[in-house]
Image (cartoon, helix red, strand yellow):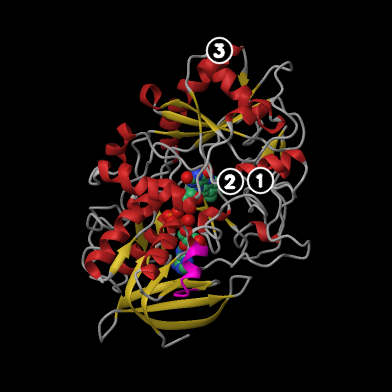
Amino acid sequence: DSGAHVPALVVGTGYGGSVAALRLARAGVDVHMIEMGMAWDTPGPDGKIFANTTSPDARSYWLRTKTKQPLSNFLGFPLDKDVPRYTGILDAEEMGGIVVYQGRGVGGGSLVNGGMAVTPKRENFGAILPSVDAAEMYATYYPRANAGLGVGTVDPAWFESAECYQFARVGRKHAQRSGFPFVFVPDVYDWDYMKQEAAGTVPKSALAGEILYGNNYGKKSLQKTYLAQAAATGKVSISPLHKVTSVAPAPGGGYTVVIEQIDTTGTTTATKTVTADKVFFAAGSVGTSKLLVKLKATGALPALNGEVGKGWGDNGNVMCGRANHLWDPTGKVQASIPCGGIDNWAAGGAFAEVAPLPTGIETYASFYLSITNTPHRAEFSWNAQAGRADLNWQTAWKQTSIDMAKTIFDKINAKEGTIYRTDLFGTYKIWGDHLTYHPLGGAVLDKATDNYGRLHGYSGLYVIDGSLIPGNTSVNPFVTITALAERNIEKIIATDL
Ligand code: FDA
């Protein structure tokens, strides 16, 4: 309520925010979390909380009147359709040259993501977070994050026979025939549940194509892991459909936080002001960066340093499909949860997830999301005239990522005598190079903050999400975001409380 005072306020309920809330609460601190998205705890008219990927509805998109599906076309037909404007779960935020997909709601990205929970190879860690002690991360914080998230790997024996992973076995065969290592990718999906889905004994989620707009069963989102444990402490409360718009030093110490309550059409229905001793920015790379750039430029937090807004990257994301021969089908039923990838990071700068194309029909297509070692970094800056933060991303930068992905797929195509699909991202367009699922950076560790996420210029203000990581993690990012948050909050609790 307006006028309230809280010891710790957390902006956002994704990975960083959930780790902060749990650990602070366990240390005896009362925590209030502010989340602009919905709670996602109540079934809709169809009895389900989340919409299926094959039939998007109001629940699917954040304040859009038309869907913006990552795969926009199929066999030449555009797939997007009109939906009612609503505070739905997936935000396709157009940032000038790049569409940044993000989860909206209690649980952040964990609501919409594929659950791929990958710890980077140790030899790559120095390039990911150069100021962080790798030995500590791999001995303590990565294991802690993996345990807290409930990470597991597909049963290799089951994998060999499961109909729903034919697409992955085809992906492995093609990778290995071209001399690339295929690696199993861990995931937070409940693998035993998926076996039961395949056996037909439980309601289907991964095997019904659920993923982008939420999984009704099977996936261990943050709601089921960190946030459930945080709630169990009795010291954490969450306000969904509330958006933080300002943080500034309060006259008597601590910070004044301005929060707008919104309804499901996105309209502001109330503006509330509270004070907090400590504020944790966990609004995600884009959310935190935009907020900090605005607060610095508009005079709310003028002492933030010049690193705020810098070092933003797309984790080198680029997608593509390959057309297989008719004797090499990828399967009618595909689990929406990927379980393997092709590692050509060292030689070609690309790590490619073998992704499903869960259309319910045989497509003879192999589909991939590549993470590439692109050097390009963009910067957020305050556009005073428009009253918003802009990102200076250059569309041409994706060519570097395409070239890196081609080190894998040109070779596979040559070996298999196959070609790229040209119908998935438009008409005669091979590369899905207009988007990212993995925004990172904008308030980089040891630059905008100290080496533990304390913002320079203000004591009691912290960044604890993906914006700390300068643009690339070499693999999917949420395990690294979680592990870094575990490391930082342990230090903050030990020294700042
Ligand atoms: P995160 O984005 O999770 O949370 C931020 C929260 O803050 C959101 O809930 C947001 O609504 C809220 N917020 C923002 N501004 C606010 C404000 N002003 N006031 C209040 N609340 C505010 N990663 C991976 O490792 N494996 C995978 O398989 C995938 N797959 C994948 C698929 C798709 C479709 C997407 C979109 C993303 C992925 N990712 C992924 C990426 C992963 O989900 C992402 O890196 C993390 O969710 C980022 O965690 P953070 O804690 O940084 O923020």
Q: Nearer the viewer, mark 3 or mark 1?
A: 1
Quadrant in which the C terminus is drawn: bottom left
Q: Which residue is mark 1?
A: 193
Q: Amino acid at mark 3?
A: Ala
Q: Is residue 486 above or below residue 247?
A: above
What separation in Å lies between label 3 and label 2 (alpha carbons)? 34 Å
Residue at 38%, 56% in the rendered image: 465
Residue at 43%, 32% in the rendered image: 401
Q: Is residue 283 visible?
A: yes
x then y, percent, for residue 75: 73, 32
For label 2, the crowd category at 10 Å Cα-Cα, with few meaning under 14, some 14 to 19 and many 20 or more, is many
For label 1, the crowd category at 10 Å Cα-Cα, with few meaning under 14, some 14 to 19 and many 20 or more, is some
Label 2 within 8 A of ligand 1 by Cβ: no
Q: Which residue is mark 2?
A: 189
Q: In the displayed structure, does residue 158 sit left or right of residue 147?
A: right
x then y, percent, for residue 281: 37, 64
Q: Is residue 173 above or below residue 279?
A: above
Q: Are marks 1 and 2 in contact (CB under 8 Å)?
A: yes
x then y, percent, for residue 79: 71, 43
Q: Which residue is mark 3?
A: 414
The answer to which of 187 and 436 lies nearer the viewer is 187
